Image (spheres, helix red, strand yellow):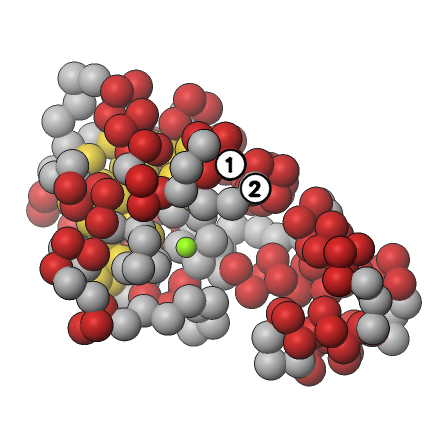
Amino acid sequence: MVVVFDLDDTLYPEMDYVRSAYRAIARRYGADLLPRMLAAPNAREAFDSTGIDINEILDIYRTHKPDIKLPWQSLYVLESLRLAGNIIGLVTDGRSVTQRNKIEALGLEHFLRPDLIMISEEVGSGKISGEAFNRIATETKGESRYIYIGDNPEKDFIAPNGLGWLTIEVKRGGNGENIFSQKNEELSMPYRPKIIIEQLTELQDIINRHG
Ligand SMILES: [Mg+2]
């Protein structure tokens, strides 16, 4: 089976990355900025609170080596899938440098097949275009079962649904701080996941049932 994951708010909470960036900014421009940024309701206001040129802030945000780690649930699920002989891939939207730094910090190379790491900047189009999923299907010709696990119904499931993959939405990015809204009711059927789970650890059961 080919099991493909989204990265942010699926395998780890994206707010962890945001807070890691706050710390990197505070290391560069002054420790007094940290409590101010942490108190802001969102990243944009946190950045504004520093009074520093937004381009310099965004450069740190996008290129710093993040201090983030894989939650135990992700580690458990990835290791179980790997040991069971599944092929594991990643489809994520974002800049190459940013997403590669996250992959390295989380130790995901241990689990992912290198040619199945699809980052939108490297692919040349976002996940909604379907290109990343098509490439994974091509690279794994002969496999019959595909799963994509993501958190954002506005863009995560439309393409893999179209390819007949089993799509699974993980709620609340594991820690209740999901950055994007998850309003399935407002979306038409092709955008919706086939299954919704609360915790990544529920994946094992689903795979056993659908595998
Ligand atoms: Mg996501």
* Residue 129 % position (x, y): 31, 40
Q: In this view, does 196 lie above or below 76?
A: below
Q: Which amino acid does label 2 sit on?
A: Arg
Q: Verify CB contact (< 8 Å) between mark 1 and mark 2.
A: yes
Q: Which amino acid does label 1 sit on?
A: Glu
Q: What element carries label 2?
A: loop
Q: Which residue is drawn at 45% across and 45% down?
A: 93
Q: Name the residue under label 2.
A: 95
* Residue 148 % position (x, y): 26, 44
Residue 29 in view here = yes
Q: Name the residue under label 1.
A: 121
Which quadrant: the N terminus? top left
Q: How far apart are marks 1 and 2 (CA)?
A: 5 Å
Residue sitting at the far right: 30
Q: Residue at x 66, y 65 (%)?
A: 19
Q: What element carries label 1?
A: helix
